[in-house]
Image (cartoon, rainbow, N blue to C red):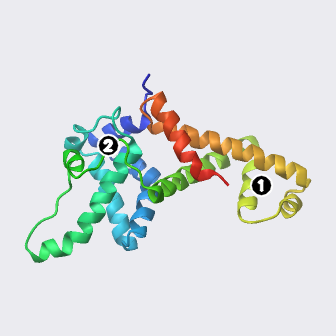
Amino acid sequence: MHFPSTIWTQIKSAGSGDRKALEDLFRKYQPAVVTFARSEGASAQDADDIAQEVFQAICDVKFLRKVDPAKGKFRSLVLAVTRNLILMQKRENAAQKRGGNTKLVSVDELHGQGFDVEDLKDERFDNFWVQTLVARGMELLKRECAEKGTPFYKAMVLFVSGEPYTDVAEKLGVSASQVKSYIHQARAKLKRFVGGLIKEYSASNEEYRKELKYLLKFLRD
């Protein structure tokens, strides 16, 4: 069974010239790419440029013809393209001195270089990816709590900032046991939101289950 994967619909829209779809895709997943690029030694400006190129490349019509959502994870594809763009950037100065040009490698070339896009993993990148999903999940939690007038988001923010239960309880005007309940519920909601975001880019039930199991290990205490 295949999901009506919203991320691939968005990618195809961006590839058809929908600038808003490309900008939304970039906004959602740019932090993970930028943080990974910085960890590889890129400057802040270069990391931002790399992130923009990653999503422009993925949404390119010629590139999309080579991509089968059922055979490769979206996260792995982003990692593969990011790695190659970082490598290209490192080689750019030398290539320019030789009078050569750099170009984006194709999906065929990714396989030719030994990359298995379907199973490609890098724990640093995956950790940054999860951080991006959690940040988006926290925004969803914030929105829900604002709409329903519930204290879970505020309790969670205070708690993750290092505040002990007693201090959080005092600021919220409730008991410490209530705070523990708020945190428990906030974590459950956050896990559900993150799961929904993973489902957003998963192409099948099997991929969703594997991705959820793999990525949620980065959220363990």
**Marks 1 and 2, how far apart at CA:** 38 Å
Q: Is residue 14 above or below residue 35?
A: above
The spot of residue 193 in percent (x, y) is 60, 41
Residue ID at (41%, 69%): 38
Does residue 20 appear anywhere in the picture?
no
The spot of residue 220 in percent (x, y) is 64, 51
Residue, disc 1: 155
Q: Quadrant of residue 59?
A: top left
Q: Which mark is residue 14?
A: 2
- In this view, the residue in front, 19 or 84, is 84
- Mark 1 surroundings within 10 Å by alpha-carbon count, few (fewer than 14), some (14 through 19), many (20 or more): many
Q: Which mark is residue 198?
A: none
- Mark 2 surroundings within 10 Å by alpha-carbon count, few (fewer than 14), some (14 through 19), many (20 or more): many
Label 1 residue SS: helix
The amino acid pointed to by label 2 is Ala
Q: Is residue 77 above or below residue 99?
A: above
Label 2 residue SS: helix
**132 sits left or right of 77 in the view:** right
Residue ID at (74%, 40%): 148
The spot of residue 109 in percent (x, y) is 19, 49
Q: Earlier in the sequence, mark 1 or mark 2?
A: 2
**161 sits left or right of 201 in the view:** right
Residue ID at (55%, 40%): 213
Residue ID at (45%, 57%): 125
Quadrant of the drawing holding the N terminus:
top left
- Numbered disc in front, either 1 or 2: 1
Does residue 11 appear anywhere in the picture?
yes
